[in-house]
Amino acid sequence: MEENILNPKELFNELVVEEEGFRHLNNPADGIKPITKKYLGIPEKVEQLGNKFYFSDGDAKVEIIVVNEEIMRVRLAPHGVFLDDFSYAVPVLKNKPVPVTLTEDEKEFRLSTQIINCHVRKADFFISFSDKDDVITSADATPMHWEENAQFGGYYVYCTKECHPDENFFGLGDKPTELNLRGKRLSNWNTDAYSFNWNQDPLYRSIPFYITVNEGIAHGIFFDNTYKAHFDFGSEDRTKTSFWADGGELQYYYIHGPHMMDVVKSYHLLTGTHPMPPLWALGYHQCRWSYYPEAKLRMVAKGFRENKIPCDALYLDIDYMDGYRCFTWNRRYFPDPRKMIKELADSGFKTVVIIDPGIRVDDNYPIFKEGKEKRYFCRRSDDYFMEGHVWPGRCQFPDFTNPEVREWWGTLFDELVEMGVAGVWNDMNEPAVFGSGTFPDDVRHQYDGYRGSHRKAHNVYGMQMVRATYEGIRNIKKNKRPFTITRAGYSGVQRYASVWTGDNVASWEHLQLGNIQLQRLSVSGIPFCGTDIGGFSGEPDGELFTRWIQAGTFAPFMRAHSAGDTKEREPWSFGEPYTSINRKFIELRYRLLPYLYSAFWEHHRYGFPILRPVVMQEQSVLKNHFRQDEFTFGDKILICPVLRPGQKSRKVYLPKGQWYNFWTNEVVSGGDEVEVLTPLETIPVFIKAGAVIPEYPVMQYVNEKPIEEVKLNIYHSDYEANSFLFEDHGESFAYEQDIYSEKKFVVNGDTSSLVMNHSMEGLYTPRYDGYLFNVIGLPFVPAKVSIDGKDIEFAVNSDKILEFRHTKSFKHLEITN
Ligand code: GLC
């Protein structure tokens, strides 16, 4: 299969001297023939080194690491030498020594754990994976291959796998297209995409991780390669799925399911989860480009309190700075920022400020001077500093892939944090440059000692910027949780920041798109995500804005944001009936905070996503592979936003089981679509039978008042169901020392009873004394309520909800007829 290949050893000698692993070797002008494609040949032998296995065709080598029972990592070294094993996505490969057996017959080598097998075919080096029943889940359609590129002297690396007729694809970050990626061909190259369109590709983030579901079995592929990467899900050839990159190493993880949830959990095991956010960060955030001067910001703050619409965070966009110089203040607009931030905080508002990576070239600007003196800014291959125009004009850009630069950047937040700034919004970090789009390819990066060009560092630049921000603020605040948000990112960015989907548009199409993007980000390892509610550019009318607030109530990150040339965009800007409906939904968000916070804990601790598309609930139902409106928020609440104007009712698919219409408490059987009324006042919200949904009292901001009582909404079911309630201080890292409380509620019922058991773990005791119980959907007239054997007084209200109170310490509740 070889065509026109250089002597690999010769090439290797060149490879080791060049920092990035490549050189302009095969320039035809040098008299060397251009090189085209080369495929792996025939595997000659296998060597084992613990849980690492090395196969070779004589020249090329393939390494397969058994990471654990469900995950194997495959790497290809075209000329027998692996690049340094370094990854920003997987800082430490936590491989577990699990028993692996290596067997061989005339057809194949086979590596087996208790759960999966990896087959290396002797005839042609095809690599495939199967489950413990020997069902093949992933199989090469060609041997791994590569191409040496005459233009820049590197490799293109390719992997092509079989694609089955009913195989469907999910994940890959924030692609603005259908949830199911079957038939799509997409690329990863972080791009500032103002007012992006449906199907525009690529956008701001690069998450080279996808999940496939075929015949009810799911597995994931994580192609950990930071270069411009490409994915083809049966687009060019319906029978093939390919992923390839314009450089770097062919390195991917096979992650076994069999459920999509298992794949996402395992992906988080590799790349980490989001730390617990401060509780206030789950409240409502109000942003606009730009709230200035100070009087304007104060008016917005007043508007929230006067209109009694809860809000926890107000944002300052670029105009708070002096000439857009990062870490400075425009004193004309904000004469005394410290005082302003303090007074806003006194009325319950956290201040979040924007930071961009472009540092204005200005010798009178201390940050530029210091960065220049210490050579912290990125340089071109000829050693000149990389320059480009962004908001401040002529700028240079810190090399965030240099740990020393990250540390320096982190310290720059000292003053802002000390002034009381509560969060930092990292923007333009694709990196974006006006005119050229981004940096030229030849810009050099330190890349944590594994130096390389911008081709290698581009997709991780934004993630390393927000990492520097997060780690810096964490160092300054010590035991207080930072809050950071980022536009750009690469796999693993969830360890450092929440993410918003960038510059969307005030249109119904974008509301639909955002609904898909958030589900996709969630299954791609980015749990804390949101869209610019209302649309960044353009003008929504009251109906669109309200429908967006309603959908945003169930987004993990809830922030309204708009461009500076648009009309006022606060939740009361559209008058009635919109203001009241917006208030009702934002209040609902605050009521559900303990539920959302618990879902966040499930993410942080166990790797579950917060939003879960319907396909994740029932992946063996093929029709569900094409549903993209409905999703669950945590695992108990199903949402189906209204995504079209004037819609009076809409179809909603409910997964199998019993569901309660949240607004009417009517019980509906799942497993089919139901028609649901959608007056402007509501969107379809359903609660799973057996759920216990905790509610906090409505407050205008988190911690406005001490919580005296928590409401527990218990939904009767005729099967056993578990619910959790996680609580802690909400601001510190004490949860890392087990200072939290995780309560478990196990509900079971039948036609004449409901039983609930309650247990608790952790070292934190919430301050409130007791619960107000609301029991919904009892199929009998209750005659007796007892807690731990003692009878309790109760009442049944006009909505047939059974109500009673009790202290929070109890073990067993019984309701009988
Ligand atoms: C970018 C951001 C947007 C911000 C604007 C000004 O377009 O995506 O959110 O408001 O820059 O800073």
Image: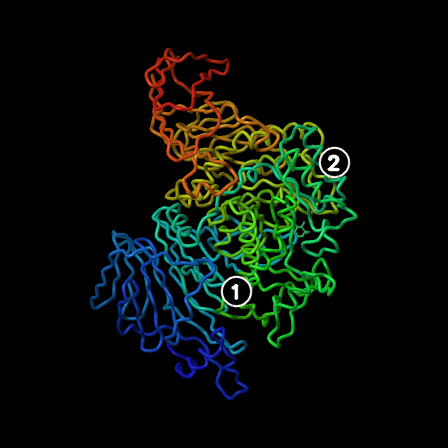
Q: Position of residue 735 (x, y in %)?
A: 44, 41
Q: Position of residue 356 (x, y in %)?
A: 65, 56
Front one among 366 and 790: 366
- Specify the quadrant that holds the N terminus: bottom left
Q: Is mark 2 within 8 Å of ligand 1?
A: no
- Specify the quadrant that holds the C terminus: top left
Name the outermost residue toward the bottom: 31
**Mark 1 vs 2, N-terminal side:** 1
Residue shown at 37% from the left, 43% from the top:
620
Quadrant of res 408: bottom right
Which is in the foreground here, disc 1 or disc 2? 2
Secondary structure of residue under mark 2? helix
Secondary structure of residue under mark 1? loop
**Which residue type does callout 2 highlight?**
Met
Horizontal side, residue 684 vs residue 318: left or right: left
Quadrant of res 702: top right
| Residue 228 - label | 1
Instruction: From this view, report whether residue 250 is shown above or below residue 169.
Output: below
Assess disc 1: are there few (<14), some (14-19) or many (≥20) residues with their C-alpha within 10 Å of its C-alpha: many
Residue shown at 49% from the left, 32% from the top:
594
Task: Give the residue pinned by disc 2.
Answer: 299
